[in-house]
Image (cartoon, helix red, strand yellow):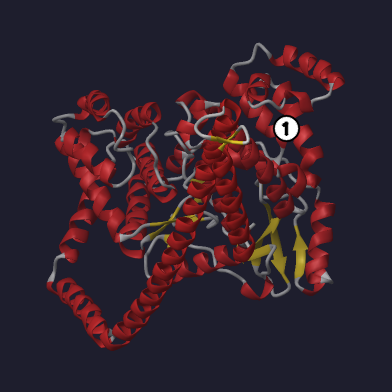
Amino acid sequence: MFFTKQFRNINRLREILFIIAGHGFGKFLDDIYLSSLISFGKKIVTFGRYKRSAKLPVEVRFRLMLEELGPTFIKLGQMLSTRDDILPEYFIKELTKLHDSVKAEPFKKVEKRLKAKYGDLNKYFIKIDVEPLAAASIAQVYHAVTTDGKDVVLKIKRGNIKEIIDTDFAIILWLAGLAEQYIPEAKELKVTEYLSEFYSQIQRELDFEIEIAYMKKFKEFFAYFPGVIIPEVVEELCNEDIIVMSYHEGISIDEVSTLKSLGYDTKKLATLGVEFYLKQVFELNLFHGDPHPGNFLVDKNGNLVLLDFGIIGKIDDKLLVHLSRVFSYLIDFNVNKLVDELVSFGIIDDESDLRAIKSDLMDALLPVYGKDLNRINFKKSFERIFKVARKYRFYFPKDYFLIMKTFMFLEATGKKLYPEFNMLQFAKKYAYKYVKDSYNFESFKEELLKFTESYINIFKNIPEDYARVKKQVYKIEKNVEHLIESFDEYIKHHDKAFNRLGFSILISSTVLSSTIMLIEGFGPKLYGVSIFGALGICFSFIMGVLLTYGYFKSGRL
């Protein structure tokens, strides 16, 4: 099906297979029966390439392979670098280098696309810097000045990036399907499911209209939250391939020594960052899902500037209740209830070895047992849990995992800024407020109104529902009657068929026995011929004629 529907991908497929083999992953191609697609000449070249890189660790070869494969694979590697539940720690550490591995597109190509979108650039911009501020897999970012003197940032999609990603992911998903078919570990890991999730996420990142909408929503929600700046969208200059927003200078949040040397209050910054995030989670029910230092700047006034809204996590009441239970069971060291909760939420397959999982989780959580909240290292605790998750193939949905990684980032960054920082103390306060708000009179009244309204709607719709059900029952009755009639006809038809079969067997038996009588001269004879045999043959002839007549008459001969 791949070769017929995606014929245009074959050259790219061969290129991908050649690069995979060249970095020493030829066994994977052997396992999924694709080695034959690499020509003999290329196999010799591949062997030479692999010989040069054979001494490198597997994780380094994997990262170099993704870099050579291009933007789609680099983006995939960047996403994998956030998934401690899928890959071991040494792979994660290596793949984080991919954030700085994307080469910028030449400005001439970028300028050509800008002119195609805007026409005369001088009409809108006094200047556009030739060197990008940042180059990512999907887009590049440039500083510019508008004709009315505003400093802005242009986030510009790479040329044909959607077509490149669609082509590459068609191949990636096809390869993943083969891997699940032939490699048991790939099937256990649900490779296709994870990759499909990654693809959906990239598709959302490619839709700049969605990113603009989220930026506006966050800016509106946090309009009166002091100390945090979200860039303002210059909507009249935006289109499907370009986002134009206000420009903000600042120091990356992880440059702690620089921040301290310039006199910034790093404790205040740590507190501000976590308060800002917890407000997103518990009040907005949306959160910035790409928390790395490059997206957090501190401006000259000590404000926290948040960049890049391409990845947004979503959280609902069900997930919040689940997470509050998980935190509670972790703190109380209640492994039995923790596993039960993870099973009920679908994180752990109920057919897994739950006894072994509980034993390993107990080992993972023992170092924090009995410790005061201030002394619990949230990041280390979850790293231990993720090791267990990899071993037993836990399945974390995207938003679930995003929030875990976000909290880990907040604690790690918070501790860099202020060593005594403890995120659980802040989370505890918000969780308590959330539970309290969930059970106050207003919430109860709102839930009661929803409950009452749903039942009123049920009663209001009873006449229509009754008429609809009655109509369906009438149709079913008619169908049943027709079925019974057809069944009766079927039985009659088969009765006749069985009668004819019996009749045929009777005739055959009569002919056979009569023939034997004639040959053996059994019984009385007339002119030396057995009378019983002759009568049997005559009877068989008459019966055969009648049977043939019946077949002709029925039209089923």
Q: Secondary structure at mark 1?
A: helix
Task: Examine the rendered structure and indicate whether residue 172 appears above or below residue 366.
Answer: below
**Residue 402 seen:** yes
Total tally of numbered discs in the picture: 1
Q: What residue is rendered at 33% in x and 60% in y?
A: 316
Question: Is residue 138 found left or right of 82 in the rendered image?
Answer: right
**Residue 198 seen:** no
Tag 1 residue: 68
Q: What residue is rendered at 27% in x and 37% in y?
A: 420
Q: What residue is rendered at 70% in x and 56% in y?
A: 157
In percent of width and height, residue 79 lies at 54, 41
In percent of width and height, residue 419 lies at 31, 35
Nearer-the-camera pick, 532 or 376: 532
Nearer-the-camera pick, 417 or 439: 439
- Residue type, label 1: Glu
Nearer-the-camera pick, 188 or 393: 188
Quadrant of residue 338 within the rendered picture: top left
In percent of width and height, residue 160 lies at 76, 54
Quadrant of residue 1 within the rendered picture: top right
Nearer-the-camera pick, 321 or 96: 321
Question: Is residue 300 found left or right of 20 in the rendered image?
Answer: left
Neighbours of disc 1 within 10 Å: few (<14), some (14-19), many (20+): some
Quadrant where the image shows the C terminus: bottom right
Quadrant of residue 495 within the rendered picture: bottom left
Q: What residue is rendered at 71% in x and 43% in y?
A: 2
In percent of width and height, residue 304 lies at 45, 55
Task: Examine the rendered structure and indicate whether residue 391 appears above or below residue 540.
Answer: above
Of all residues, the one furthest to the right in this rendering is: 41
